[in-house]
Amino acid sequence: NLEFDDSLEFNADMFVHTYKAFGPYGLGKDEPPLYELPMMQYAFYKPLYGEHVPNGEVCAGCHTLVTHATDLEGNYTGIDYVEQATYHEWLNSTYAPDGEEPATCNTCHMPRIDDPVIISSGYVFLEPRTPYGLHSLVGGNAQMLEIMRDNTEALGLETAPELFDSTLQRTRDMLRNETVDLNVTMGDWIDAWGATCEVQLTNKAGHKFPSGYPARRAWIEVKASQNGEVIWHSGGWENGSITGVDESGLAEYEPHHTVINDPMQVQIYELVAADVEGNPTNVLERAASSLKDNRLTPKGFSYTHPVYDTTRVEGLALDDALFEVGQGRHTVMYEMGGAVGSGPVDMEVTVWYQAMPPRWVEPMFAFEDSTIQAFQAFFEAQGAAPELVADTAFTVNVVGGVGSTELETTAWAVYPNPTDDGWINLQGPVQRTSTLWEVFDAKGSRVASGWMQPGSTPALQLPAVKGHYVVRWTLDSGETVSRKVVRR
């Protein structure tokens, strides 16, 4: 961690800048001494002990950025906008120093080992230091690392490509193993009307996911296929752009979803900044407010924390009972309609992350500038493919409704649907005998059951938990009829 001033010291041999470089060593008298001269001579920095270096505070300076908003003519408005507050997000989590599971930023991004390490070369008298922070320093931006690796000569970089590859591997390991837990719950596919699928994401990071620069986004892709043919697909992408979302560029944005019942709807976790006129913008100087911030909060997040003003949740996520900020968890329900034929349905659920979406970057390419044009060539060659965060694949059975022509399936119904207070009525055709009815929650657990007498329309109240339920009737023949219902 560096500190600069304007003073110089002069001797006959060299100029020595009195810049300071803080590190984790040099505090205790039992430690090996700091050898200042080699670093001052060759790097022009004086090494000093910094108490903040092993702690989260070392990250705060760069990862807390407040900008001064301008109007569309470039005039300052007096509005301050929080462009990023990753450090504050960590403070508003269970991993903060006063949290239940304290852990610093370095725990993940610069993990320490107890092995003694000699931290410089060329001097035989140097003694090992411990503990030592591994200089991993990776986040999630594999995209920029690939651009740098593939254009080292044009960018004047001296780093060997294989070193970029090792950093890319660590970056992808962090994204895939330390970022999000994915849990999917789904029952059978009812041949006449479709299926429901519950997708739950839990944030494992010590800050929001995604975090940092506002371009970052993550989304869920859900795909159902039968006999090799796609029958329902939300969140698909091509050339780095999300199908059904990115065609309109920055003019529109995808809202937060609690229920997705149209393949053109996509659950995207992102920050959407707006200018003084309330329109989405990717120009940081024009950002004056947020239209949407449904990024997954870290575990332990609270609306009442002192730094909530810099870590706010914005938009429809505020009204989503399944956007559980304290748990860092969100559950979204997919209603996949449509009749299918015989044979199982193959399901794929994937979480993607993207650091620089094309819709964010492409408006810049309209400007005539050699630097922009050079970056455009790098960007387009890289391709902007998203990074895999989590995925799962499984198969569900297709089950039928009523096979008898005597009892029409349209005669079986649940109303009102959706229901706000949980009360529903069951309706069926005129039966000759009593019929067993059962109610199942989204996880497949039976939560209620009873008998429907001939000619009756029984009323019942669903559990207090909001979400999707399935009502199933079992006929004398053993066949079943199912209807889905939503409690809001």
Image (tube, helix red, strand yellow):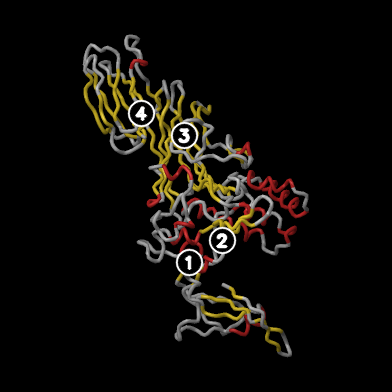
Q: Quadrant location of residue 279?
A: top right
> Helix, strand, or loop for circle 3?
strand
Residue 379 location, x and y as percent? 68, 49
Q: Amino acid at mark 4?
A: Val
Quick check: 233 left or right of 472? right
Quadrant (top left, top right, bottom left, bottom right) of the N terminus: bottom right
Q: Are marks 1 and 4 in contact (CB under 8 Å)?
A: no
**Could you give the CA–CA distance between mark 3 and mark 4, rounded to whole angstroms?**
14 Å
Residue labelled with disc 1:
56
Asked whether 121 or 464 is in front, the reply is: 464
Residue labelled with disc 4:
485
> Helix, strand, or loop for circle 4?
strand
Pointer 2 or 3: first along the chain: 2
Q: Residue 65: which disc?
A: 2
Residue 389 location, x and y as percent? 50, 48
Pointer 1 or 4: first along the chain: 1
Q: Amino acid at mark 2?
A: Leu
Q: Quadrant location of residue 305?
A: bottom left
Tell me if I can see residue 166 in this picture: no
Q: Residue 260: which disc?
A: 3
